Amino acid sequence: MILGDWPNLEAALVDHLEGNTSMVWTADAGLLGGRVPLGIVQRVGGSSDLDIDQDQTYEVQVVAATRAGVWMLASQVVRAFQKLNPGGLPGEIMVDEAANVFGFMIDPDLGTPDYLVAHATFNLTVRPHGEQSEEENNNG
């Protein structure tokens, strides 16, 4: 899916998170409550007012049967996002910064007696591979 000239990175993040955590990932929130443990990542905003870089904001949910399970999965997600900082995702996108904007919290409104849900917000500052970031342009 293309958002303007920028790809929506949901699918690339699903692949990255599946390779770096112990759960199945999807971008489909309709699966909430199905399989446990489960991770859901969805783009929820961002900005493109930067010259080459673009900020993309993602809401991440982890679903587990126990409180301990939720926190274990949440820590795996934080470490997976740290691996992107700086780095890249498969394809043409370079990640200049991955920031945990809003840390994980258990949401009592989304859970049931069978599972708990915690969510967090992450921001990725991205650019096409081969392009210099604003910081590189200012230092070069």
Image (cartoon, rainbow, N blue to C red):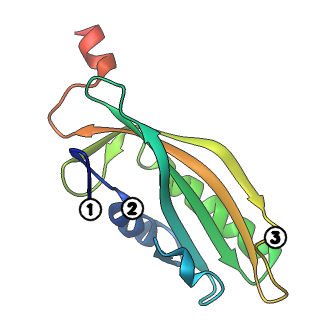
Residue carrying label 1: 1
Classify mark 3: helix, strand or loop. loop
Q: Secondary structure at mark 1?
A: loop
Q: x%, y% of residue 114?
A: 79, 89
Please report the residue visible at 81 percent of the width from the left and 73 percent of the height from the top.
67
How far across and down, in percent of the image, does residue 83 sit? 44, 50
C-alpha span from label 1 to label 3: 31 Å
Give the vertical position of 136 relative to 1 (above or below).
Answer: above
| Residue depicted at x 57% and y 56% | 59
Q: Residue at x 48, y 46 (%)?
A: 45
Q: How far across and down, in percent of the image, does residue 120 sit?
A: 65, 54
Compared across the picture, whether 68 is left or right of 46 comes to right
Disc 2 and disc 1 in contact, CB within 8 angstroms = yes
Number of numbered discs present?
3
Quick one: 132 or 43, which is closer to the camera? 43
For residue 75, above or below residue 96: below
Residue drawn at x 70%, y 79% is: 64
- Report the side of 8 relative to 31 (left or right): left
Q: CA distance from mark 3 to mark 2?
A: 24 Å
Observer-nearest residue: 82 or 13?
Answer: 13
The residue indicated by pointer 2 is 10
Which residue is at the front of the view, 127 or 80? 127
Residue 109's disc number: 3
